[in-house]
Image: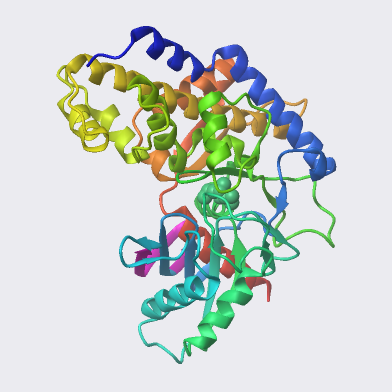
Amino acid sequence: MNFDKNLLQSIIKEFTIDTEELKEIAANFRQDLKLGLKDPKDSSLRMLKSYVGLPTGKEIGEYLALDFGGTNVRVSRINLQGAGKFEIIKRVAKPLILPGSYDYVGVGSKFEDMFNFLAELIGEAIEGENERQFYLGHTFSFPSSQTDIYDAKLITWTKEFATSGVEGEVVNDLLKDALIRRGIKNVEPVSVINDTVAVLLSAAYHRSDTFIGSIYATGQNNCYIESSIDDPKNVGIGGMILNLESGGFMKLTPNRFDKEFDEKSEKPGEQRLEKMVSGRYMGELFGMALSELLNEKGKHYGFSSIDISGILMDNSVAGNRIAAIVKDKIEKEIDSEDAKAIKELATAIVERSARIVTATYVGIIWQRAGSGEISHQHIAVDGSVYEKMPLVKENIDRALSELLEEEAAKVDTVLDTGGSGLGAAISAAMVANKE
Ligand code: GLC
């Protein structure tokens, strides 16, 4: 078939961010942090207070952790042993959508069914232990406005979730009602935290030099510990981590694919950064660009970020794996030259994603350092895109060097697998210790 080379190059250019633009994004992100600290209304970052700071490492005991916010829901029983050590006693996980069977997140889905499903999973995790009292920490990975560590109201769904009856509600109240409906009386939800906050808590449980937590998965978002919020009346347990909802950052230049996708999305105009970088969206952008190369503009092939990952993993000259992945979706045979072009396109989309995400990390690092020196630190990251997508880590490192130059040696990103669950348990322990 062979794609039009000029068209391919022009599309790739639209997905390319040079060093200058990268610096501009990081500086604008820092500026929005500054504005947001004064008044979130003046910033595209929500700067949501989590009412929790960093753990001491002395949190111990057995807790339930509910991790809700991506494609799968997980409930774990975790025994915290202190100083970063823990044991997962039991873990149950189920997808929120099982095609042909159920869908708790799509248009038409309702909150009762969604929360009944969560209660059912919690029931499985406690395995009929109906006497013993469990504290439950809830990682709820959506923008929520909080007045304390328990009271979190969903502001708006993101990541194309559309379940009715949850926006504006206190999510742990909905969970409590569902537990009662299921006859589970011995599980008490005591905390709600964002998944970025969970990752930071989990990392800080065993390392003291981590101040930024990040999720790079279905969604993309960052949080950090803000030391200037120290008003005793207003501070959380151990300080105040701010959930930035950085997926909503607006000071970026979307290309025409980004714009077109946004218009068709569940919430047009929102989560503009997330729609350019996260796992939920990269496959969609890739499909849109490919449809143009195939002269089928407007056709929806249903590529996912797992397909992109598969394409990038094919290092062969023939590109057979790429051809197989693509054939399955576009129903056409492609040759090795096309496969090479397809890989170039996928590379451009993934590189752009990693570069934008890195610019947000550096914006936070600059803001935390103020006019002083950048401290040695790790950025804790969890999520499938960070963990599994080829090219992501090396592009983060490269972008860190472009932005921080020699100071880049002080900063690295570290994978905190399972941090979303562990952090929920730690937050519940922090509540228990405070009581
Ligand atoms: C979306 C959510 C945010 C979450 C992120 C990662 O951006 O709005 O709260 O942290 O996804 O799951």
Q: Which quadrant is the N terminus positioned in?
A: top left
**Residue 268 highlighted magenta (yes or no):** no
Picture coordinates of residue 228 (x, y %)?
A: 80, 45
Give 7 or 425, whichever is nearer the viewer. 7
Q: Is residue 398 left or right of residue 361?
A: left
Q: Is residue 254 left or right of residue 286?
A: right
Q: Residue furthest top?
A: 6
**Residue 92 highlighted magenta (yes or no):** yes
Q: Residue at x 66, y 29 (%)?
A: 363
Q: Which residues are magenta?
A: 79-95
Asked if residue 421 is positioned above or below residue 171 in the image, the reply reads above
Picture coordinates of residue 16 (x, y %)?
A: 49, 17
Q: Is residue 53 left or right of residue 209?
A: right
Q: Is residue 406 visible?
A: no
Identify the main secondary structure in magenta. Answer: strand
State the image quarter where residue 300 is shown: top left
Asked if residue 361 is positioned above or below residue 58 in the image, the reply reads above
Give 157 or 139, whichever is nearer the viewer. 157
Q: Residue at x 70, y 23 (%)?
A: 27
Asked if residue 71 is positioned above or below residue 22 in the image, the reply reads below
Q: Residue at x 16, y 16 (%)?
A: 317
Task: Tell me which colouring the rendered structure shows.
Answer: rainbow
Asked if residue 32 is positioned above or below residue 51 in the image, the reply reads above
Give 122 or 412, whichever is nearer the viewer. 122
